[in-house]
Amino acid sequence: QVQLVESGGGLVQAGDSLRLSCTASGRTFGTYTMGWFRQAPGKEREFVARLNWSGGGTYYADSVKGRFTISRDNAKNTAYLQMNSLKPEDTAVYYCAAKQYGLGSWDYWGQGTQVTVSS
């Protein structure tokens, strides 16, 4: 069982940067593929970024490619989402998720952190 806790959200202006963190419980963090998702008001939850457990392979939604970077520090049991050049359309609740060895569905989810970008 893995528990995920996001932090780092807030209110920023367009063009600003923000870094989200997702800290996991347990001692097997390095075996989990980590992902970030977001859900804007009135919209479905959408994929943002993914980082494979095996040390390679990052994937991004087209809408954030070149602006967002996903990374991890296994020693700290933490995944990050660096968000640069933020736009008002990035406003959403951001969730981190995990699945062991990258298999199957996203089994574990955090509670979410709000990111609001003003124009």
Image (cartoon, rainbow, N blue to C red):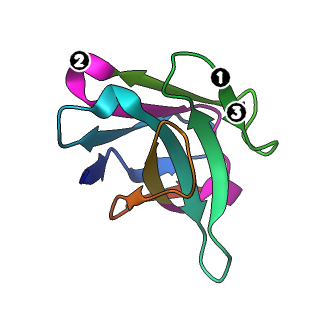
Q: Amino acid at mark 3?
A: Tyr
Q: Is residue 46 located in the magenta-colored stretch of the structure?
A: no
Residue name at image x 65 percent, y 83 percent: 42
The quadrant holding residue 95 is bottom left
Q: Which residues are magenta?
A: 74-93
Name the residue carrying label 3.
Answer: 59
* Disc 1, SS: loop
Q: Which mark is residue 75?
A: 2
Residue 119 shows in this picture: no
Residue name at image x 38 percent, y 30 percent: 31
- Residue 41: image x %, image y %? 59, 78
Tell me whether circle 1 and circle 2 mark residues in contact (CB < 8 Å). no
Q: Earlier in the sequence, mark 1 or mark 2?
A: 1
Residue name at image x 56 percent, y 55 percent: 37
Mark 3 nearby-residue class (10 Å; few <14, some 14–19, many ≥20): some
Count of number-bearing discs:
3
Query: In the displayed structure, would residue 44 be above or below residue 28?
Result: below
Query: In the displayed structure, would residue 112 be above or below residue 41?
Result: above
> Horizontal placement of 102 versus 48: left or right?
left
Residue that extends furthest to the left in the rendered view of this protein: 26
Q: Is residue 77 located in the magenta-colored stretch of the structure?
A: yes
Mark 2 nearby-residue class (10 Å; few <14, some 14–19, many ≥20): few
Query: Which quarter of the figure is the C terminus placed in?
Result: bottom right
Name the residue carrying label 1.
Answer: 57
